[in-house]
Amino acid sequence: MKTSTGAEQEDLFDAIAYLIGQAQSIAICAHTNPDGDALGSQLALKMLIEQRWPRKEVVCLLADDDPCPRIYTFLAGADELVAASAYEGVPDLFISVDLSQPNRLNHGEQVMSRAKTVAIIDHHPCERPYGDAALIRPGAAAAGVIVAEFAEHLGLEITPDIAQCLFCAIATDTGRFQYQNADAEAFQVASRLVSCGASPSEVSLNVYQSFRLQFLHLKSLVMGRVTTFERGRIAYSYATVADIERTGASLDESDGLVDVVRSVAGSEIALFIKEVPGGKVRGNLRSKGEHDISGVARALGGGGHRAASGFTIEGGVDDALCAALPLLKELYNNDARQEHDAL
């Protein structure tokens, strides 16, 4: 696995800065079904590039054709995001943010294939990184942490807009600083971002305290379906296309419902799946303990961190449960055996 820390990170920052300096046109793209870290990090990176290299042509792309999720539209630059499928340019540089697996770029992968050079800024484990410069540090709590450190490395001003985007990135990827990845570095960077003008209350208001009534109706359905097995250690629930249509909720609103499943007392692994148009199912996985659920996500064509991962597969709810639950059961039992043997 290729990772970067310490002095190597500084060298890679220089390598990425060199690629940016040599490029005139730059496209930045994050993963399909973008979350707060994906969007906050790429929007902040665009503003940093424009600050340091004001004559560059920089565009932030959405991997999917769906618009920016409603809860993140308050971020500066969110209204300028462009669907990758609509972008016809041939960028001098393509920067992949918050992912290091090309298949999770969706339409952005076609743009990347046209680019003259490619760089990666990511914190997900990756066995075979691609690109001309790949800064991959799984130890970072969020891609936003790395982008913030990139700004400091270059001596750039972190404006209030940049700070807000990066604070949103870190806050959402650490589950409001409640997940296992909420380490000292995450708090230190977040503190500096607040001193630069980030507003934790505004992030919380937009992301966690602005639920539409339609979403709350969907949430109640999901809560009523929560099921556990393996003596309550694994919990799961789901939402169908029919549920979303009947309640009037939107797809992007349902992404946070995995935390409803995760909150079950005694559970260590949580799975939330939702049907999406086109005969597909998206799955969100969370681990509250030492279980590394990223391998399960990768086995299902997805990816992520050891404590927070996701995947998309063809089929319906039953297909997703049949595919994911045996893998989760195997993971839990293997970990339990290893823990027992270590005693």
Image: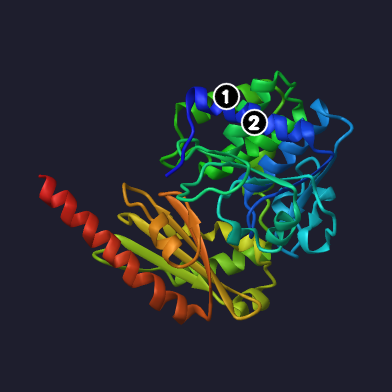
Inspect this view and state whether residue 232 appears: no
**Which percent across, then down, holds residue 70?**
73, 55
**Disc assigned to residue 37:** none
**Which percent across, then down, holds residue 46?**
77, 38
Q: Secondary structure at mark 2?
A: helix
Farthest top residue? 155
Nearer to the camera, 299 or 3: 3
Instruction: Tell me the quarter of the image containing the N terminus.
Output: top left
Task: Name the residue that disc number 2 marks.
Answer: 15
Dot 1 amino acid type: Glu
Q: Nearer the viewer, mark 2 or mark 1?
A: 2
Task: Name the residue that disc number 1 marks.
Answer: 10
- Residue sitting at x 63%, y 59%: 33
- Residue sitting at x 17%, y 49%: 339
Q: Is residue 306 above or below residue 321?
A: above
Alpha-carbon neighbours of circle 1 within 10 Å: few (<14), some, or many (≥20)? some
